Image (cartoon, helix red, strand yellow):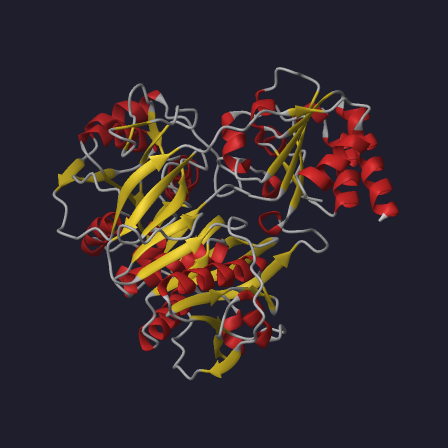
């Protein structure tokens, strides 16, 4: 059986977990077994609809206290459940919480683990999974040598599959370990799309010359419904908040569309965005290295190009 | 307070990524080695800041690697570690590495075990979480702020679209990222002092690897950028909608 961990926040299942369910269901199909999901805590989502993503059953530990994430407690409950259900493969989204618990679960189950996976396992020669390495600059095919396996799948690398089915819900009863982490405050930036969950990202660099010029970028992001990001020099100069910094030492993202405005494309920046499906580069310097990594490029002055781009988007949306 | 800081050796961020021996090994030819930036800039520097506030703090460094890791660990000592341990193993299996660190951690009464959020070569982000399971200690990952008061750590960690504040009773394990501290450059006094600081080499404990690397590959090159004239933005929108199908 393939067991998929469902991550959630503010009573909503995360998009990355939807993808993890579809990924786990595809592995279950390869292995000829069932795909079942595990939820710790409570959500507002209708759990039977997870069948549409490929889960035949949802095991739920219906306890509000588990809505606060505690890596030690969550890992222990997941490992116990995986043992009880005799799961062969345990799947996580390689997101913030997945990174915190999947390796613990692997240790507890004596399972080999691949994090940052970006493909279905190959079963021709044992059990091999491809993952991104060197910050997205290369791939490695990793053989898991243990009977049990843990895989954390990169966000936006597999996609969501549609099944015409509905999941059954099974409530579990397990003793909950004492909390090791007390959550004292949660500070969510209201009204902003979280960068790591965003399909569309608009990002700015030093080419925009100063924080006072960010309006054109924000207008474009608003027209697209995109999240905003920036390069390291921009966040280091405090033109934009640190949580917007994407790159090797900032956040690594893999949206469907990444629009880079006035960013030259240093190798460290590319390491944070090179898993994006489509990259658009707007830069007045035709020699900017970013053009080599781009799908579409506009050589021109951002202060003219970006407002025209925004207008074209709004026109397209108006005609829809 | 006793802090154990995990240090990993990684290729420089601008290193050319290439492979040898039938794409089974990273090509180290001409590669400059650095301390993994997350281990250095955020985890180690924050440990040093804690020691600057409370000089009774001991900072021990651990690295799992061959003799070629010594310049890296000396640099970490020059920045401000008190002593270092190198476990003489060249494994690249996270589980084996975590077991080596855990074996050392069990011998010292560490209040805090600190790692970077991931290494920039294998990007596995496994060690902190694995240590938490092996040592049965609380773990907070992707932290960008840490204060220690008595036996309580107050930590800010990243969550999707924001931050969360956690309180944890020590001992614990923490993985660090941007925001935690600022990069420093070792000064001459630190470099001189590092030469005589203790660097102990120990043999690895026997552990079976759970995984093995079979093959590396490089992503297919982009087929080439399609250039759109600055006055053709409606064309760009059309391409994104109909060709790339991303909007």
* Residue B114 on image: x %, y %: 36, 48
Residue A300 or residue A303, whichever sits in front: A300
* Residue A152 on image: x %, y %: 42, 55
Asked if residue B172 can be seen in this view, the reply is no
User: Residue A94, relative to residue A32: is it above or below?
Assistant: above
Residue at (46%, 37%) from the top-left corner? A136
Name which quarter of the figure residue B228 lies in.
top right
Q: Image quadrant for the C terminus of chain B?
A: top right
Q: Is residue A93 left or right of residue A245?
A: left
Residue at (66%, 16%) from the top-left corner? A286
Q: How many marks?
A: 0
Asked if residue B77 can be seen in this view, the reply is yes
Residue A130 or residue A99, whichever sits in front: A130
User: Residue B113, relative to residue A28: is it above or below?
Assistant: above
User: Residue A169, relative to residue A249: is it above or below?
Assistant: below
Residue at (55%, 72%) from the top-left corner? A51
Residue at (25%, 47%) from the top-left corner? B97
* Residue A47 on image: x %, y %: 57, 75
Residue A56 or residue B110, whichever sits in front: A56
* Residue A208 on image: x %, y %: 72, 26
Q: Is residue A87 left or right of residue A258?
A: left
Residue A186 or residue A163, whichever sits in front: A163
User: Residue A273, relative to residue A180: is it above or below?
Assistant: above
């Amino acid at each position: 059986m393939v067991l998929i961990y469902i991550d959630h926040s503010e009573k909503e299942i995360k998009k990355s977990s939807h993808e993890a369910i579809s990924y786990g269901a595809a592995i279950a199909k390869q292995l000829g077994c069932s795909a079942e999901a595990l939820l710790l805590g409570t959500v507002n989502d209708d759990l039977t609809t997870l069948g549409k993503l490929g889960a035949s059953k949802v095991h739920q530990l219906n306890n509000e206290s588990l809505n606060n994430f505690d890596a030690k407690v969550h890992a222990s409950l997941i490992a116990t459940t995986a043992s009880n259900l005799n799961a062969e493969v345990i799947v996580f989204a390689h997101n913030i919480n997945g990174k915190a618990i999947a390796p613990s679960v692997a240790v507890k189950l004596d399972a080999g683990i691949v994090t940052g996976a970006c493909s279905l396992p190959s079963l021709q020669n044992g059990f091999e999974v491809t993952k991104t390495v060197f910050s997205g600059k290369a791939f490695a095919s990793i053989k898991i040598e243990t009977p049990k396996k843990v895989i954390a799948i990169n966000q936006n690398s597999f996609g969501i599959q549609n099944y015409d089915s509905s999941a059954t819900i099974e409530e579990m009863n397990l003793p909950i370990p004492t909390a090791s982490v007390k959550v004292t405050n949660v500070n969510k930036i209201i009204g902003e799309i979280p960068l790591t969950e965003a399909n569309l990202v608009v990002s700015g660099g030093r080419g925009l010359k100063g924080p006072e010029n960010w309006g054109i970028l924000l207008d474009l992001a608003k027209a697209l419904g995109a999240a905003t990001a920036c390069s390291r020099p921009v966040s280091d100069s405090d033109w934009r908040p640190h949580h917007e910094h994407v790159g090797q030492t900032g956040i690594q993202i893999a949206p469907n569309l990444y629009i880079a405005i006035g960013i030259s494309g240093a190798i460290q920046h590319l390491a944070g965005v090179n898993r994006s499906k489509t990259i658009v580069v707007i830069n007045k310097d035709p020699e900017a290295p970013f053009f080599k990594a781009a799908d579409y490029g506009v050589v021109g002055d951002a202060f003219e190009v970006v407002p025209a781009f925004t207008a074209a988007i709004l026109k397209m949306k108006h005609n829809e | 307070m006793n802090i154990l800081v995990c240090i990993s050796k990684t290729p420089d961020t601008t290193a050319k990524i290439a492979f040898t021996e039938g794409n089974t090994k990273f090509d180290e030819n001409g590669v400059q080695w650095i301390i993994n930036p997350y281990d250095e800039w955020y985890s180690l520097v924050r440990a040093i800041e804690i020691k600057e506030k409370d000089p009774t703090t001991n900072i021990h460094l651990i690295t799992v690697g061959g003799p070629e890791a010594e310049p890296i660990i000396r640099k970490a000592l020059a920045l401000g570690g008190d002593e270092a341990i190198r476990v003489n193993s060249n494994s690249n299996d996270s589980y084996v590495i975590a077991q080596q660190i855990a074996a050392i951690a069990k011998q010292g009464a560490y209040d805090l075990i600190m790692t970077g959020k991931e290494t920039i070569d294998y990007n596995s982000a496994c060690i902190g979480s694995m240590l938490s399971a092996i040592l049965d200690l609380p773990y907070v990952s992707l932290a960008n702020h840490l204060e220690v008061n008595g036996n309580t750590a107050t930590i800010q960690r990243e969550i999707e679209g924001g931050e969360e504040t956690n309180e944890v009773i020590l001992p614990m394990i923490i993985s660090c990222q941007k925001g935690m501290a600022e990069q420093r450059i070792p000064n001459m006094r630190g470099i001189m002092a590092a030469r005589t600081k203790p660097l102990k080499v120990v043999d690895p404990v026997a552990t079976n690897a759970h995984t093995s690397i079979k093959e590396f590959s490089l992503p297919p090159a982009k087929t080439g950028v399609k250039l759109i004239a600055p006055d053709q933005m409606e064309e760009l929108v059309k391409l994104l909608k109909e060709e790339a199908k991303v909007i």
